[in-house]
Image: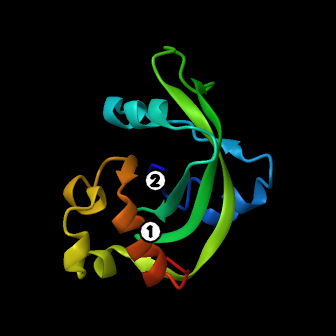
Amino acid sequence: MPYWLFKSEPSSWSWDDQVGAGEAGTPWTGVRNHLAKNHMQAMKPGERGFFYHSNEGKAVVGIVEVTKPYGPDATDPTGRFGAVELKAVEPLPEPVTLEAVKSQPELADMALIRNSRLSVQPVTEAEWHAVRRMGGLAG
């Protein structure tokens, strides 16, 4: 199963906001990068990802699940970009900082390090298990 990482600035949309959206979840709108768009187009309901606080905090703080596949993004007047819907699954008991990720040799090729500006990124299975363990969850 593919895994993902979704970046959000906490001042715009935080982990607490995502949790507050409940079981219904929320559309992951506002993505305006074609590579990130391609990643979202590949997503299927049930796939999971990390919720990452960017700029403020710079840490993986929770696990989300895709609940609806790629569709129109109501915030894009051009109609060129779309969104998936996500719901919060569980918080990481210990946030995993960018600094901690960078300190792990087995995560050196992670997109979070190699392409740090990309807002929606793929995560390999090995990276998924490593970051979960670092955050206090079973692999």
Say whether residue 72 is left or right of residue 124: right
Instruction: Return the mark for residue 56.
Output: 1
What residue would you read off at disc 2?
3
Q: SS at mark 1?
A: loop
Residue at the spot 29% in from the left edge and 79% down from the top edge: 99
Disc 1 marks which amino acid?
Glu
Instruction: Please indicate, yes or no, whether residue 55 appears anywhere in the rendered image.
Output: no
Rendered location of residue 35, percent (x, y): 32, 34
Q: Residues within 10 Å of mark 1 (few under 14, many from 20)?
A: few
Please state which amino acid type lies under the numbered disc 2: Tyr
Residue 104 seen from this side: yes
95 on left or right of 35: right
Q: Quadrant of residue 106?
A: bottom left
* x and y, in percent, of residue 79 in the image: 51, 15
Quick one: which residue is furthest to the right in this view? 23
Above or below, 132 against 52 in this view is: below
Instruction: Classify 33 as above or below 135.
Output: above
**Residue 139's x, y, as percent?**
49, 76
Q: Earlier in the sequence, mark 2 or mark 1?
A: 2
